[in-house]
Image (cartoon, rainbow, N blue to C red):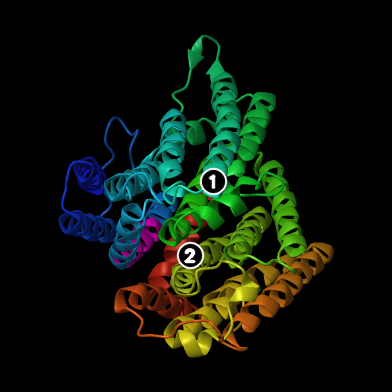
Amino acid sequence: MIAALLLPVVAAGVLAFFVRADALRRVLLVGAAGAHAAATAATWLAEPAPVWGGWLALDALGRLFLSITSALFLAAAAYAVGYLRREGEGARRDFEEGLLFDNAPEAAFTGCLLLFVAAMTLVTLAQRFGLLWVALEATTLASAPLIYFHRHHRSLEATWKYLLICSVGIALALLGNFFLGVAATTGRTTLPLLVPDLRAAGPMLHVPWLKTAFLLFLVGYGTKVGLAPLHTWLPDAHSEAPSVVSALLSGALLNCALLGVLRAEQVCAAAGLAPFGRELLVGFGLLSMAAAAVFIPGQTDYKRMLAYSSVEHMGIVAFGLGLGGVAATGALLHAVNHSLGKAMMFLVAGNILARYRSKATGDVRGLLRVLPASGVLWVAGFLAITGSPPFGPFLSELTILRAALDQGRIALAVGFVASLVVVFVGMATSVLGMAQGSAEGARGGREPWLGIAPAAALGAVVLGLGVWVPSTLWTALEAAARLVG
């Protein structure tokens, strides 16, 4: 079953580079997304057997993030069909007018997109720390060409910034693997760096080396999570990447990097160091929320605004995981809500950009009249990701806040709420201004259903999770939270 998760996507990714027909390549993309979703759904019915001596296995934590990735991939693939058709027509027009040196590299885009999803799938399956590191590095290499798809000087700058900063982070994480190996050495024997083996031998691990390893993992992988002050690549990459890529970067990649940190926290918890890791997560979480609260108000680029919102929400997740207990379950629920809601917002942002030809909030006015469906989804998405009832993030944020109050951490709770309020006001100013106002100069018209249906489906799920969390999902979230310790 594990092979069914990886092989079809990898094969489709390689094949996409050689398929000449655009239509066939898009069928390949959607087919791979459907196969990946079906294989992921099967893991909820029967747990797949580990392979390669336990190097690849799917536990409750990995299955949760795999499911998020698969759902977003399916929505992104459906949206990409219309997006690539529109981009292909524009690129051919620019090529004929001499504005491009060659046509849009759709084959490279589709191939890298599929390999990007394959790498994220490998992250969720990897139980050996070395393989986890390789998989996370592969996500960087596969996604970098996607950010540069439009071949603009700003996208080139964003791509290099993404590569350089994430490479520094991944180098620190590699050093963390070395320190973890030292921590797992007893006498002349070094334990295999497998998560289950290290958890079983937790009391035998060398504490100082393990603490240092966790710090390196937190800083290294935290760079890719987007935790402040390590987040500087994120606004540029999310802003310049195609919207369908931004949806996967924000909704799936950040979770995969967070999984790397949580694997290290699992080992720390088994060694009796859970409070050490948790307090660091609380600190980085609050700092990330505060950074977003500083940069979101007055933000004039709506895609950068969404990127800073991702910094805030990953901070919320880290904060809840750091509190532990029911807050950890709420944090994982928030990871689900944020991924679906933010992907929805980025897909709608793609529709707005296609119609208004600008990412400036001041250039977008009368959205509810020019693009009625996208306008409604844009406002609904804003309400969702700012934690307004009855959407899912309200429930998950309330769960985290209540846990903080129950633990008597009043100051932390006040800082948590203050950041949420500032972000809400800052985003409301931009989003509501875009939705209302005069629509002079904007061209109205019918919206393609492939540009609306994926975002609407994601929004419906986020709304549903605010009304009712299925017992199966809550049980899965609790099981994943227990693994973190």
Residue 333 in sight: yes
The residue sitting at the front extreme is: 97
* Amino acid type of the residue tagged 2 in the rendering: Val
Q: Which residue is mark 1?
A: 153
470 up-or-down from 295: above or below: below
Place of residue 249 in the rendered image (x, y in percent of width and height, measured from the top left): 48, 53
Q: Earlier in the sequence, mark 2 or mark 1?
A: 1
Q: Is residue 366 left or right of residue 245?
A: right
Q: Is residue 68 magenta?
A: yes
Place of residue 455 in the rendered image (x, y in percent of width and height, measured from the top left): 40, 74
Q: Which residue is mark 2?
A: 336
Q: Secondary structure at mark 2?
A: helix
> Few, some or many C-alpha atoms within 10 Å of disc 1 (few <14, some 14-19, many ≥20)?
few
Q: Secondary structure at mark 1?
A: helix
- Start and end of the magenta stretch? 67-80
Q: Is residue 65 left or right of residue 401?
A: left
At a point 70% along the width and 55% down the height, the residue shown is 288
At a point 59% along the width and 59% down the height, the residue shown is 307
Q: Is residue 209 magenta?
A: no
Residue 386 in sight: no
Number of marks: 2
* Amino acid type of the residue tagged 1 in the rendering: His
